[in-house]
Image: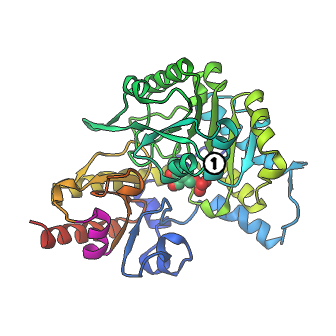
Amino acid sequence: MDTQMTMTAAAFEADFAYDRPALLARRNAKWRQYDPDVIPAFVADMDFRVAPAIQAAIRASVDAEDYGYPMRDGKKADRAVLEAFAHRMKGLYGWEAQADLSMAIADLVQATFASVMAFTQPGDGVIVQVPNYPPFRAAVNDTGRSFVPMPMKPEGDGYVFDLDQLAATMPPSTRMLILCNPQNPTGRVFSRAELQAVLAFAQKHDLLVLSDEIHSDLIYAGNTHLPFAALGPAAEARTITLNSATKSFNIPGLRTAVINFGTEALKARFERHFPARVVGSVNSLGIDATVAAWQDSSDWLCGLIAHLSAMRDHVYTRITRDIPMIRMKKPEATYLTWLDCSDLGLSGTAFDFFHTHARIGFSPGENFLPGAERLVRLNFATSRVIIDEMIDRMAEAVQRNTR
Ligand SMILES: Cc1ncc(COP(=O)(O)O)c(C=O)c1O
């Protein structure tokens, strides 16, 4: 693993941020969904070039036309991702995420749906923190399970949850808790004490915990990520962990993720529903890119976090100064921020207002929480110049169109 951790925010932006023409020339969903005059700030994709080690790993396969059934180090290639994940979890958190207890899978949404289907029955309750990443709601509702909300309430500088209230409101058939840590869209990073309280709750009510940790590399100073399963054997016995390099290293199109089962019994239970042959194996470019991300890209990641941290502070400073009626709490992780526009007195949704009057494509709040039409989620993983243009346009639209 590389050890250099030196790249500054300015160096990262200069070397890796795409400008607007380059972004418009790309074929990704973020810059293709809306008309070219719209600044997209929705899907969790970043406007940055990938780490050099990732590009080199992919280029090596392309140059060699190496597209056969892949092997790496004498083993089936998926194993390389599982071992890289285990190595990373051990190095960062001291957690033994054994490769034998993991499977490579195309993406976290697939893994979420499969886990809900494998570990619960139709009609069972599944707890989801709300507001939530929209596919969690779909994984519960579309599979005939019962959605049990766990509200993240705004309090002070962040958001908190109340397990006593959850216990009082959840149905007795509740079997699973989907934990999103760091949480999308609030940006919370849960403390050890909070995670321990969730574990005690899960033990008391005999719940499995499906822990989505896809944003765990994007943590800002003052916060510490702890994988839920790393709390110890009692947690591992009831935890399925999902992670990938796709959010933090900007490679979601390469379709490579990891599902880790805390015990052999959990893995066997999953495989009874979805044998490895049904899950399938992941593609060789995704495997090489993920290994390069996790093992050889720490300098790039360090620069990325420095830049994102500066952009988070910049967005906060500008919004509180120029559009103080919008309420924002600084996220502790992720490049996403949840903006409460209720005080603007809008007649329609906040998404429609900014799309129409500012030509910005946010994520609509109601996708994360029914009734949250006056909120939007903003993605600030872009250059300072694009962020400034976005906030200038927002401030102008608010000034022109609200009283
Ligand atoms: C919390 C969370 N989980 C999962 C995903 C999507 O992951 P994938 O592309 O692997 O399905 C996202 C994407 O933004 C996310 O924010």
For the C terminus, the image quarter is bottom left
Give residue 387's position: percent from left, percent from top: 33, 65
Q: Residue at x 48, y 79 (%)?
A: 24
Asked if one can make out residue 301 in the rendered structure from this viewpoint, the answer is no
Specify how the rendered protein is coloured. Answer: rainbow
**Which residue type carries mark 1?**
Phe
Relative to residue 180, is residue 302 depicted above or below?
A: below
Quick one: which residue is furthest to the left in this view?
403
Q: Is residue 392 above or below residue 120?
A: below
Q: Is 1 left or right of 17, judged from the image as shown?
A: right
Foreground residue among 344 and 252: 344
Closer to the camera, 229 or 300?
A: 229
Please tell me which residue is depicted at 24% across the width and 67% down the height of the picture.
394
What is the count of numbered marks? 1
Residue 340 position within the rendered picture, expressed as x and y whole percent measured from the top left: 26, 52
The span picked out in magenta is 348-359
Residue 399 picture location, percent across and down: 13, 69
Membership of 202 in magenta stretch:
no
Look at the image and tell me whether residue 348 can be seen.
Answer: yes
Quadrant in which residue 363 is drawn? bottom left
Q: Residue at x 77, y 71 (%)?
A: 62
Q: From the image, give the main secondary structure of the stretch colored magenta.
A: helix
Give the quadrant of residue 401. bottom left
In the picture of the structure, the residue carrying the numbered disc 1 is 113
Horizontally, is 91 left or right of 30 in the view? right
- The residue closer to the viewer here, 206 or 110, is 206
